[in-house]
Each structure stands twice: as structure tokens, then as C-alpha cells.
Amino acid sequence: MSASAKLDPIQMAVLANRLNAIVREMANTLLRTARSAVLAVVRDFSCSIVTADNRLLCPGEGLPVHIFGSSLQTQSMCDLHPDLVEGDAFIHNDPYLGNTHPADHMIMVPVFYEGEHLFTTCAKGHQADCGNSIPSTYHAHAKDVYEEGSLIFPCVKIQRDYRDVDDIIRMCRRRIRAPEQWYGDYLAEVGSARIGERRLKELVERYGVETIREFIEEWFAYSERRMVEAIRKLPKGKLSNSGHYDQFPPLLPDGMEIRVDVDVDPDAGRIEVDLTHNDDNLDFGLNQSVACATSNAMAGVFNCLEHDIPHNAGSFSRVDVKLREGCVTGVPEFPHSCSMATTNIADRIVNATQAAFAKIGDGSGLAEGGLGMGAGGGVISGKDRRFGDAPYINQEWVLVNGGPATPTTDGWLNYGLPVAAGLMYRGSVEVDESKYPMLFRSLRVIEGGGGAGRFRGAPGGEVVYGPRHDPMTVVVSCDGQVNPPQGVRGGHPGPAAATYKIDRDGNETKLPGVVECVLEPGEWIRGVDTGGGGYGAPTERDPERVRRDVQERWETAERAREVYGVVLTGSVEAGDLAVDRAATASLRASMGEAATT
């Protein structure tokens, strides 16, 4: 704390943690009352608190891709509704007005105290269905917003005087495939935002308006100082890195490079991330929105800095994200679709940014994290005979996708996607089988499924599922089948993703990355997730770590010898697996000699 601070450090800590507690209560409210599995089980939602002048104050444990841009949406609310009053609530899912993508419905509640607008509580939830022209909230092939077909609410008032605006509710019920499920999720989001409203009023009542104002400014100032200190520890320089998005016929027959340029200026305490050197908007649903492009670049930066720097407008003020009008990684030109702005290209931006920092030197940056929304993240739909052939729709989330290796740790299993950073919960096989007419045949971690390295990427997983009685449609939008997550500083890439359809006779057909597949009873879909990239040369890995990986079946004995240069004796089954250190040293020496020649 600076000498000029008006609040002592203890009071600052108390208030900061109280705000976090409010956001946690908002999140628990949404989790416990939502109806769809994608919210109530998977937790594909985020809550946050924004100041009345539209600065992100408290993101809680929200997904980075969701909440880093919350203030863009509250700014739209203030611009479009200058007559805000207590009891209002707004629904906002317009990617051209600050939202992420149309499937993310944000409920915003302006919070008043003694007639003054002090905060806005935000509850954003990914919808199982948002009215798209296909039964999925992701429409990669959409040529524009019209073909995409989703219901768009450009910051529309959905509650007045704490009561629903029925006109808006009726629109959603008419256009959404499972209207009661949507309405249950809507009520959960409103309840979450209203809980936040109630608790913030109690907070201001207890401490007083002036104390809260002082805290906000000092908290932002403290966060900015922490960010400046972290940046000043980095060497000055410009870093450039790129990833390669998979082929997407016919628009991208060779795929597409996603380039990121990072300029670190420790003297000024600033970092710039430039996303302008990429292709123009294309006629598909993969274009980034402003919120997503900004959030994903920011996430890549924060992943490489001290973990306890607060994420808010104070620390954000030291990172400049440079975007270009009409760019696939920038400011979208209407009517280009941003249906999948929160994934795919978004994940490439996070990965390319964090891997760029590895070029500073050993000990900096991260490898690329597992990506690709494979069959484990597919959107399933059909009719459920248990409920009179009522329609059902839900996004599965039994992805594994191994996490990236870091300079000091192995990758994290159940990472999910770079944009979510492990903050989403994995779905439950048992819950999904009870809620939807489906069956899982298997779910497993893949041995040797991570990128090798001094620290290895976490392995991916495999899942096989299908319909119980009646046909099921599965929409998969998977990147990483051709260009898997890369390692850094000598680390190996993780294995690629893959999707297969299994017929009644057990024959497998490989499917393209983006596909709408109909499964008849007795047919299955099999998804293989990517593993995270490794950090550092595999032959530098502690042999005992390799032995333990084989013991736990994260790695294979063959890869231990051939990739890591570790000679093992005994067996997993007998319980006497051990490292032959002399043979290991000899093998690694010969591998090093072979590499130099």
C-alpha cells in the first residue's frame, strides 16, 4: 500500500474478499438453481461486479473469456438506457455491442443505493439453445448472422420494477427448442444478479458510500501497481508468435495462421498485444468479437505473470490489445457471424500469446494448452420418449483436453479449453444419462496422450457415447485435428484430436473437424481430445517423474524409453517398477549424441 492510501491494508483485504464472497454467492445461486446441464452441472457461466462508470471491479472465478469484457456490456447498457432505475434488468447477447457470442445471455442489474447507481451485477450463462438455425449454439458454417439464426437482444430491458417484461419472455419461448429449460436458466441468472444486488446494498449500508468509493479507487490503484511491478520484471522486447488453425473447406483449404505480436515495455510498465496482422473477416461463424479477442489476448498475458495479481480494470489498464476493423481476430464487420467467438480461434489466441512469452527464455511463458471442442463438447439434441417425445438439447462437457506444461509444473488434467482455463466443471456421465436419452460406453484418459517435456503436457481423453432409443443429432466443432497444441523450448506437441462415427457393426468412419452427425440407435460417436504441449526437452525430465507417470498410466513404458530416455525395470502389474539409473544415463547420452549429429 502507498503512504497516501486512505484505507489500511486490513480493511482493504476485508472489502476485497467481501466482494469476492458476493460473486461466489451469485455463482452458487446460479449453479444450484439452473435447469440445463450446461449450467447446473458444467458451470459454463460467469458472474461479475462492474462499477457504475463501467470498470470491472470483481470477476470472481469467472471464465476469462466471459468476464474480462463485462464492462463493455455494461457500457452498452448505460449508453442505450440513460434512464436506468431501480428494479431494471437487461438481457444482452449482441456481439456487436460488447458481448462474447450470441449463445452467452448476460443478465445485468443496475444496483442503486439511495437513488444513486453504484454498481452493475452481471450473470452470464451459455445457453443450451439460443434459437440458431441448427440445433446447436455453435454454428461454424454460418455465412452471416442471418444464416446463424440466433435470437439477438441488443441490451434489452427484460425486467421492469422487478417484474418480467412478458413480451421478451414470449419471444424466447417461441424460438428456443427447449423453452422451459431456457426459462429455468433465465430465472437462475436473474436470481444470481438479484442476490448480488441485495448483498451490495448491505455492503454499502454497513460501511458507507464514501468508504466504498475510497476502496474502489484504492483497489484499482493497488492492482495497477501490482501489474506494473510484474511487467518491470520482464526484459524489454518484441515477441512474435503464431498458431495455425485447421483446414476449414472451402474457405480455408490450407487452414489459417493466427499471429500475435507482443511488445513488452518494462520502463513504461505496459504490454501491447497486436492482433491486427491476421486475415479479414470470413463468411463463417468463427470470427472473433471485440470482447473475445480482447479477453483472450489478456488471458494469454495474465497466464505468464504472477498468479495473484488482481484481475480488474486497474491491472487491465496496463495491457493494450490492438484490434483492426474487419479482422477475423478483431472488430467484426456486420453481418459476419461470431457464433463461435468463444472457442476455436479464441483458443489459438490464448495459446499463441502465452507461448510467445516462452521466447523470453527458459522459465518464462507456457506451452500451448489442449484445444478442440471435440465430441466430448458436442451439442446433442433429439426427442425424449420418456417425456412424450419432448425436444431436448444440451452441450456435453466431458472434454479432457490436457493442460499446457509450465516452466515448473506438468499440465493440468481436465483443463478443458484455454479460454476456460480449467474453471468449468466436467460433466457427469450419470447425470447426463439420467437427464437425457443417451448412453456412455466409455470415458478414459489416454496413456501417452500429452506432449513430452521436462514438464509434460497433460494427456487428453477419449469418450464414446450414443443415443439410448431414438436418433440423436450431435454437432461437433473441433479444431486441433491437424494442428495440435505445440510445446515450447524443446517440448513436444500434444497428440491431435479426432472424431469417429461407429456403426452398428463396429466399423469406424473418421469425421471432419466441424460436422453435424445423426446417430441411430446402436451407433456411437468417439471423440479423442488433444493433449497439452510440453515445456523443455523430454530428456531433461526427472526419471523418477517418468516412472511415476508410467505407474499411474499417464505415460507408456515405450515412450518412457524412446522419448524420455528412461530405462525402467520391473512392471506396473508386479508393483516393482523402478528406474535403472545407469542405463538411463547411458541412453540419454546416446540420444544427445544422435541429436547433435
Image (cartoon, helix red, strand yellow):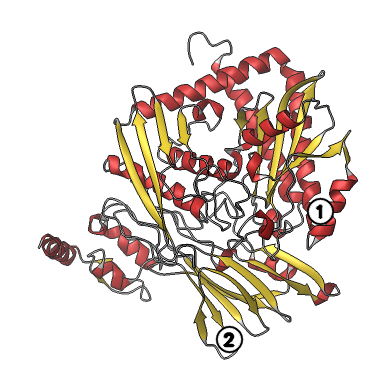
| Amino acid on which the number 1 mark rests in the picture | Cys
**Which of the labelled discs sits on residue 503, or is there none?**
2
Which amino acid, by three-letter code, is at mark 2? Asp
With respect to residue 339, does 250 lie above or below? below
Report x, y in % for residue 545: 32, 58
Residue 471 figure quarter: bottom right
Give left or right: position of 468 versus 167: left
Give whichever of discs 1 and 2 has the lower sequence position: 1
Task: Give the percent coordinates (x, y) of residue 20.
Answer: 63, 33
Image x and y of residue 161, in percent: 89, 33
Instruction: State the residue at coordinates (50%, 28%).
Output: 315
Coordinates of residue 430 in the picture (x, y in percent)? 67, 68
> Is 404 positioned to the left or the right of 585 in the image?
right
Question: Do residues under tags 1 and 2 come within 8 Å of each other at their CB atoms?
Answer: no
In percent of the image, x 56 and y 45: which residue is there?
A: 332
Q: CA distance from mark 1 to mark 2?
A: 37 Å
User: Which quarter of the rendering shows the C terminus?
Assistant: bottom left
Q: Which mark is residue 232?
A: none
Task: Give neighbour class at mark 2: few <14, some 14-19, many 20+ (Cα, 10 Å).
Answer: some
Q: Quadrant of residue 227?
A: top left
Q: Which residue is mark 1?
A: 172
Disc 1 is placed on an element classified as helix
Q: What residue is at 65 percent from the left and 77 percent from the top?
A: 518
Q: Residue at x 62, y 14 (%)?
A: 214
Neighbour tally class for label 1: few under 14, some 14-19, many 20 plus, Cα within 10 Å: some
**75 and 234: which one is in front?**
75
On the question of residue 475 being in view, the answer is yes
Query: As displayed, is residue 422 above or below residue 195?
Result: below
Q: Nearer the viewer, residue 527 or 405?
A: 527
Up/down of 116 relative to 130, above or below:
above
